[in-house]
Amino acid sequence: MKTVIIWASAALQLTAFTGKSTEANSPDGLYSIQSSRSVSLVDSKGQSLITLIPSTTGNTKIEVSWAPTSKRVVVATNSALGSAIVGAWTDDNGTTWRKCLELDADQTTIVNQAQRDAGSRLVAESLTLGDWGSPNELQVKGSMTFSNHKQAEFSYVLEFKSGIGKLDRQGYEEGILVAKDYKFTPSQN
């Protein structure tokens, strides 16, 4: 597993890497995630293969985690407006990369449960990428903050499903990146 955190600031037009590695290269060194005004998967020659996130406006923390096989990559973004997860994967020979996103609907049940427990509405949440349990499954951890200042922690497994997902208007395949095995720690003051 390789995890990288990127801070992208549109105001400064720069990208800084921090975290477990100083670069966002795949374990085999054939691919990399690059971030400036967008987030793209590039090959070892720097040629863009696929744009994962078309725009990184404002201050955005971008976390990248590669599967040990270099065949899957997950990108999590956290900003003042919320968080999102996108992924990319390739077939065995690495000739075609496809992109997918985790649907917000995956989190609806746990968010509703957390809001009931806190007795308040969700105002902020953030995600952190954990370890790869297998070449197709990544642990995700998160925290929620509510309007009454209570907080809750959660975790789940993000799985790359096989097959072809429904293509949305922005070119992401839906139903490929699926959350499962939620664990929830109730709200705390």
Image (spheres, helix red, strand yellow):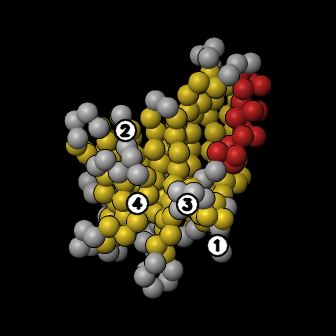
Other residues around mark 3 within 10 Å, as few (<14) / some (14–19) / many (≥20):
many
In three-dimensional space, the C-alpha distance between marks 3 and 4, rounded to whole angstroms, equals 10 Å
Q: Secondary structure at mark 1?
A: loop
Q: Position of residue 30 (x, y in %)?
A: 32, 74
Whichever of callouts 2 and 1 sits on the residue coming sooner in the sequence is 2
What residue is pinned by disc 4? 51
Q: Position of residue 87 (x, y in %)?
A: 51, 60
What residue is pinned by disc 1? 164
Residue 65 visible at all: no
Whichever of callouts 3 and 1 sits on the residue coming sooner in the sequence is 1
What residue is pinned by disc 3? 172
Give me the residue at 22% from left, 35% from top: 12
Q: Quadrant of the C terminus?
A: top right
Whichever of callouts 3 and 2 sits on the residue coming sooner in the sequence is 2
In three-dimensional space, the C-alpha distance between marks 4 and 2, rounded to whole angstroms, equals 15 Å
Under mark 4, the amino acid is Thr
Give me the residue at 49% from left, 75% from top: 90
Disc 3 vs disc 1: Cβ atoms closer than 8 Å? no
Q: Work out whether residue 83 or residue 50 is closer to the camera in this orientation and state it.
A: 50
In three-dimensional space, the C-alpha distance between marks 3 and 2, rounded to whole angstroms, equals 20 Å
Q: Position of residue 131 (x, y in %)?
A: 51, 56
Whichever of callouts 4 and 2 sits on the residue coming sooner in the sequence is 4
In three-dimensional space, the C-alpha distance between marks 3 and 1, rounded to whole angstroms, equals 11 Å
Quadrant in the rendering for residue 69: bottom left
